[in-house]
Amino acid sequence: MTRTPFVVKILSTGAVAAVAFGASLTAAIAAEFPTRPITLVVPFAAGGPTDIVARSLGASMSKDLGQTIVVENRLGAGGTIAAGSVAKAAPDGYTLLIHHNGMATAPALYPDLAYKPLSDFEYIGQVADVPMTLLGSKNFPPNTTAELVAYVTKNGEKVNLANAGPGAVSQLCGALFEQATKTKLIAIPYQGTAPALNALLGSQVDLLCDQTTTTLPHIAAKSVKLYGVTTPARIKSLPDAPTLQEGGLKGFDMKVWHGVYAPKGTPKEVTARITRALQAALKDPEVIARMDKLGVEIVPVDKQTPAGLQTWLKSESDKWQPLLKSIAAQ
């Protein structure tokens, strides 16, 4: 009995030493990070808007980190396959995810989702926002936002609204437009942005809401009708284009946003190092010039942080999930 306290003391001292050793080992690993290439997983096809942002970002971050960032496209199920694979990856900082609004909307679209976007990842930071544009085919009668609202209010059941498939940001934008105009249009889903845009160019559909990364050339060529941009303020890439709010759709605010994530449990020292590389890349003149050309707007510095991304994802989840659930219930 008299020896018990001594034994407990030895065990306690050993436990403390083990914790201290583990902490020092983690710190040592983090101090050396990275020692090999990093994989940045993109949930969408090569050449698409998110892929373009990822490749520009990865090339610049590689310079800061001293290791190559390999962009890997893992397609399927609205981005959930890629996100799920990263959630299950080793939490060592060598597998990262870049994703857009789909991180906020997936729980409403996929009831059996294998991961929880808000809690199964470590946050690195936000990257950039991509404004969207509401377009009409050249043969569609309305010429202004005001005319468009009047037309769909009267003829909504005859108006086709294309999107890039369930959960795509074009579908979300279309849903927001229907909500703002109190109409129900004919949704025409396609397998991606490219076929949806081709259908609009061929006047097979009437309307499409899509990102500036893909629509700017067609707007410049006047091969589509531009009703307005979806952000509250006018954008640098289309300074003369009105906002949809100016056209009468009060409170209309829709953009494609991107964030970078790591698997849950990645050491804070490692995520902090990746965040620093992200912030350095977003100051890179080459990245800034590339984003400007695409109409992409780099987010403010306070959003290029783990806290900034976490706060934004929570607010977007609260905004979109009730709307999507109400649409599914109709």
Image (spheres, rainbow, N blue to C red):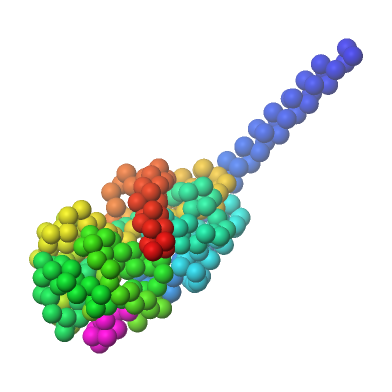
Q: Is residue 288 visible?
A: no
Which residue range is magenta in the image? 196-205
Query: How far across and down, in percent of the image, does residue 168 sit?
Result: 38, 68
The quarter of the image holding the N terminus is: top right
Q: Nearer the viewer, residue 267 or 201?
A: 201
Residue at 34% in and 68% down: 171
Query: How far across and down, in percent of the image, does residue 267 sit?
Result: 55, 45
Location of residue 157 with respect to 58 vertically, above or below? below
Does residue 114 show up magenta in the picture? Answer: no
Q: Nearer the viewer, residue 317 or 287?
A: 317
Query: How far across and down, in percent of the image, does residue 76 sit?
Result: 50, 71
Q: Nearer the viewer, residue 182 or 299?
A: 182
Does residue 204 show up magenta in the picture? Answer: yes
Q: What residue occupies the far bottom of the structure in this picture?
A: 202
Main secondary structure along the magenta-highlighted residues? helix
Quadrant hosting residue 240: bottom left
Residue at 31% in and 47% down: 301
Query: How far across and down, in percent of the image, does residue 246 sit?
Result: 11, 59
In screen coordinates, is 156 left or right of 80? Answer: left
Residue at 74% in and 25% down: 13
Residue at 38% in and 44% down: 311
Location of residue 145 with respect to 269 vertically, above or below? below
State how many labels appear: 0
Quadrant hosting residue 27: top right
Q: What residue occupies the far top of the structure in this picture?
A: 2
Quadrant hosting residue 146: bottom left
The quarter of the image holding the C terminus is: bottom left
Q: What residue occupies the far right of the structure in this picture?
A: 1
Q: Is residue 116 visible?
A: yes
